[in-house]
Amino acid sequence: MNSFYKSGDPLYPEALKQKQRELRDGFPLPLTLRVHRALSWLRRAENEKDDLDVRFILLWILSILFDRLYVLRNQLVHGGATWDSGANRNQVRDGASLLGCLLPVFIDLMMDNPDAEWAMPMYPVVEE
């Protein structure tokens, strides 16, 4: 499965990463962390071509907006589904496609709004 957005599109993961590099010095710390983490998961998901379960989990960062997808996520993450079974394949495929399409839009919106009040992520960076 390839990215919904192709190379050259401003929402292609690598284009978003370049935009983040250009703008991040002007971001408040909470936005810096959120965009950095979201891009890391998006870019990793982009490399996952064959395993839709893993791709879906890697793209999952917006649970509040997607109650129905949250149930599917819980089935995959908490053992309510058999690995790579034939059941729920259409739902997993469609869920991964939806998240792969929307996540770049959300990351781009975050970077376009650095002055919004960005709460600190639940798990801030821990210095060693």
Image (tube, rainbow, N blue to C red):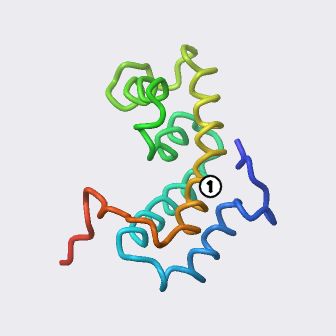
Taking depth in this image into account, of 114 and 15 the one nearest to the observer is 114
| Residue 78 drawn at (x, y percent) | 32, 28
Q: In the displayed structure, does residue 102 sit left or right of residue 56?
A: right
Q: In the displayed structure, does residue 104 sit left or right of residue 113?
A: right
**Classed neighbour count for the residue bearing mark 1: other residues with Cα under 10 Å, few (<14), some (14–19), many (≥20):** many
58 lies above or below 16: above
* Residue under the image location 25 percent in, 59 percent down: 123
41 lies above or below 60: below
The residue to which callout 1 is attached is: 104
Taking depth in this image into account, of 84 and 127 the one nearest to the observer is 127
Secondary element at tag 1: helix
* Residue under the image location 62 percent in, 46 percent down: 102
Please state, as top left, top right, bottom left or bottom right, where the C terminus lies in the image.
bottom left
Outermost front residue: 116
* Residue under the image location 58 percent in, 37 percent down: 51
Q: In the displayed structure, does residue 121 sit left or right of residue 105?
A: left
* Residue under the image location 38 percent in, 65 percent down: 117
Amino acid type, residue under disc 1 in the picture: Pro
What is the quadrant of residue 67 in the picture?
A: top left
